[in-house]
Amino acid sequence: MFDTFKNRLEITGILTTITALRISAGRSTEPIGSDLPVIKDALGRPFIPGSSFKGALRSRLESFLRGIDAKFAANPAIESEWSITSDAMTKLKENYKNDAALTEAILKQTDLVSHLFGSPWVASKFQVRDLTVKEETWFGQYQERDGVAIDRDTETAAEGKLYDYQVVPAGTSFEFRAVVENAEKWELGLLMVGIHQFETEQIPLGGGRSRGLGVVKLDIQEMQWFDTQNDPKRLLNYLKKLVNDDKTAYEDVKPPKPHKQEWTQALIDYLTRELSHPKITFE
């Protein structure tokens, strides 16, 4: 079925490294330089791939939902553990010839995380741009650190296993922007739970996390929300304001606005209902 625009949430903020950050670009082939450089843009500046942020957020939400019920979050890395495998999708298509009925059946069987983050059979509603560095917080330099593999028998440095790696210094800030479209209220509640984890420094990014690297803090600066409320005139007015760069096209979501509480409560209510309704499966 073709998508119909229903709502849009734009989130902007600043992500700051509390400890040094390492998102690897792979092993270097340069004869001089770090063995393990960090990922950089074309101008040599550090950035955080949107996929890294989104992946860390998804993983944390999956762990929360599995703690409630394993059916709420599938394993995206292993097809046999998907909520809808390729074979199951084939059977769904055989059972539902009508496009609308097939879409409804697919969504009923899709795990909750994939509703928001996407899967091979459902498009993602949540998009995160690459996080670009704020120039005033980065001084054009990386830190170089040494690493070494330990021989487990002698408990000393293994011969020939010394290496060095780059990190982005603590205190470096990055621009954050994400967009969610056509989300249900419970899906927005799930996103608010995940965003709060980044706001409270609970989700590390990148490699070396067991060494204390990758602790970050997200400060949300603005959340802009628009809901058509199934009103064509409301949507037309929104489009007119967008074209004219009128900021009132969106509703600014800030306390004491009730949106976060409303969305989070919608998530709790949805999970409660789902716990009492087993999913239909096609063996």
Image: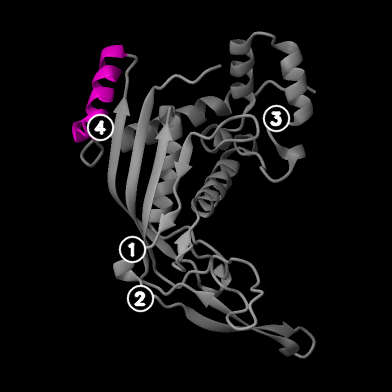
The residue located at (55%, 68%) in the rendering is 209
For this view, does 117 lie left or right of residue 18?
Answer: right
In the picture of the structure, the residue carrying the numbered disc 1 is 134
**Looking at the image, is mark 3 or mark 2 earlier in the sequence?**
3
Residue 155 is at least partly visible in this image: no
Disc 4 to disc 1, how far (Cα)? 26 Å
Q: Which of marks 4 and 3 is in front?
A: 4
The three-letter code of the residue at mark 4 reads Tyr
**Looking at the image, is mark 4 or mark 3 earlier in the sequence?**
3
The residue located at (74%, 39%) in the rendering is 79
The three-letter code of the residue at mark 1 reads Lys
Which region shows up in magenta? 231-251
**Looking at the image, is mark 2 or mark 1 earlier in the sequence?**
1
Q: Nearer the viewer, mark 1 or mark 3?
A: 1
Q: Nearer the viewer, residue 167 or 199?
A: 167
Labelled disc at residue 84: 3
- Where the N terminus falls, by quadrant? top right
In the picture of the structure, the residue carrying the numbered disc 2 is 139
Kindly give the residue lying farthest to the top in the view shown.
98
- Where the C terminus falls, by quadrant? top right
